[in-house]
Image (cartoon, rainbow, N blue to C red):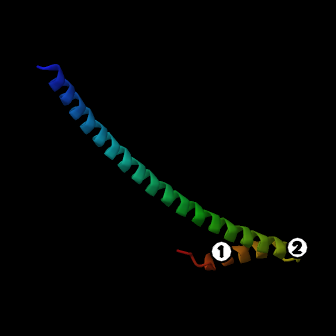
Amino acid sequence: MDEFLKMDVFFFVSTIAVVVVGGLAAYAFWRLERVLRHVEHISAQVAAESDTIRHDLADMREDVRRGKGRLLSLLGFLSKTGKHERKS
């Protein structure tokens, strides 16, 4: 086989390989971006819920400081947390 023909075959095969690997890498980055977007959404929800819990605990501390009994305060806290609406 002629050396020039061998060179053409090599460049043709390597070009196809680069295109295939580039396509797979682009697909992998696209999937990774989607996963990271979902992780960001979940972390925002966790942050919002932690703020709500922090507020509920602050309310419970205020109830205890005002002199309400610990058991009554705990029961009030548990009843408040059950009434919160979930944010979608």
In the picture, residue 24 is in which quadrant?
top left
Q: Is residue 13 above or below residue 57?
A: above
Camera-side residue: 84 or 17? 17
Q: As drawn, is 2 to the left or to the right of 11?
A: left
Residue 48: x and y in percent read 63, 68
Q: For residue 81, which numbered disc appears in the image? A: 1
Quadrant position of the N terminus in the picture: top left
Q: Is residue 8 above or below residue 52?
A: above
Residue pushed farthest front? 4
Residue at screen point 72% across, 72% down: 56
In the picture, residue 49 is in which quadrant?
bottom right
Residue pushed farthest left? 1
Residue at screen point 15% across, 25% down: 5
Residue at screen point 88% across, 76% down: 67
- Name the element at disc 1: helix
Residue 57: x and y in percent read 75, 69
Marks 1/2 in contact by CB < 8 Å: the verdict is: no
In the picture, residue 12 is in which quadrant?
top left
Camera-side residue: 10 or 81? 10
Q: CA distance from mark 1 to mark 2?
A: 20 Å
- Amino acid type, label 2: Arg
Q: Is residue 17 above or below residue 24?
A: above
Q: Is residue 85 above or below residue 50?
A: below
Residue 71: x and y in percent read 77, 72
Camera-side residue: 15 or 56? 15
**On the image, numbered disc 2 is attached to which residue?**
65
- Amino acid type, label 1: Thr
